[in-house]
Image (tube, helix red, strand yellow):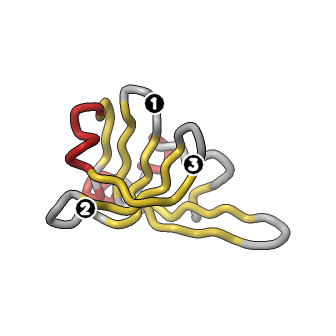
């Protein structure tokens, strides 16, 4: 698991990334909460606008071109070297 941090003069935003995937249109999904039984999960999405929200994995599966699971992120201590943090964020040391 990686922890993304965004710091400004006024606030700090932190969230744990338990998965990642990218769609054919190059939108990036940093998964914060794993999918439930219906495929709904919470993620930070970098697309036309960057936002937090619920998405459905089953609806997006046909468009996924790259993914990293929580196991892949946890198994590789250097995973932060192969996955860039969201724009404006950095990985917590």
Q: Position of residue 48 (x, y in %)?
A: 57, 37
Instruction: Indicate which disc, 2 or 1, sits on the residue closer to the N terminus.
Output: 1
**Circle 1: element type:** loop
Between disc 2 and disc 3, the foreground one is 2
Against 84, is 30 above or below?
A: below
**Circle 3: element type:** loop
Against 65, is 44 above or below?
A: below
Q: Residues within 10 Å of mark 1 (few under 14, many from 20)?
A: some
Q: How many marks?
A: 3
**Is residue 79 rendered to the left or right of residue 58?**
right
Which residue is disc 3 drawn over?
Answer: 86
Q: Position of residue 74 (x, y in %)?
A: 33, 60
Q: CA distance from mark 1 to mark 3?
A: 13 Å
The C terminus sits in image quarter:
bottom right
Q: Position of residue 8 (x, y in %)?
A: 79, 64
Q: Residues within 10 Å of mark 3 (few under 14, many from 20)?
A: some
**Is residue 90 rendered to the left or right of residue 45?**
right
**Is residue 84 rendered to the left or right of residue 5?**
left
Against 58, is 90 above or below?
A: below
Of the numbered discs in the image, which one, if any, rests on residue 26? 1
Do residues under tags 1 and 3 come within 8 Å of each other at their CB atoms? no
Instruction: Indicate which disc, 1 or 3, sits on the residue closer to the N terminus.
Output: 1
Which residue is disc 2 drawn over?
Answer: 35
Q: CA distance from mark 2 to mark 3?
A: 20 Å
């Amino acid at each position: 698991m990686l922890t993304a941090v965004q710091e400004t003069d006024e606030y700090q935003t932190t969230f744990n990334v338990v998965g990642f995937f990218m769609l054919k249109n190059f939108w990036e999904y940093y998964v914060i909460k794993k999918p439930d039984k219906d495929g709904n999960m919470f993620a930070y999405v970098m697309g036309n606008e960057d936002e937090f929200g619920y998405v459905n994995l089953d609806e997006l599966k046909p468009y996924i071109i790259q993914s990293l699971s929580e196991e892949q992120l946890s198994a590789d201590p250097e995973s932060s070297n192969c996955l860039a943090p969201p724009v404006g964020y950095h990985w917590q040391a």
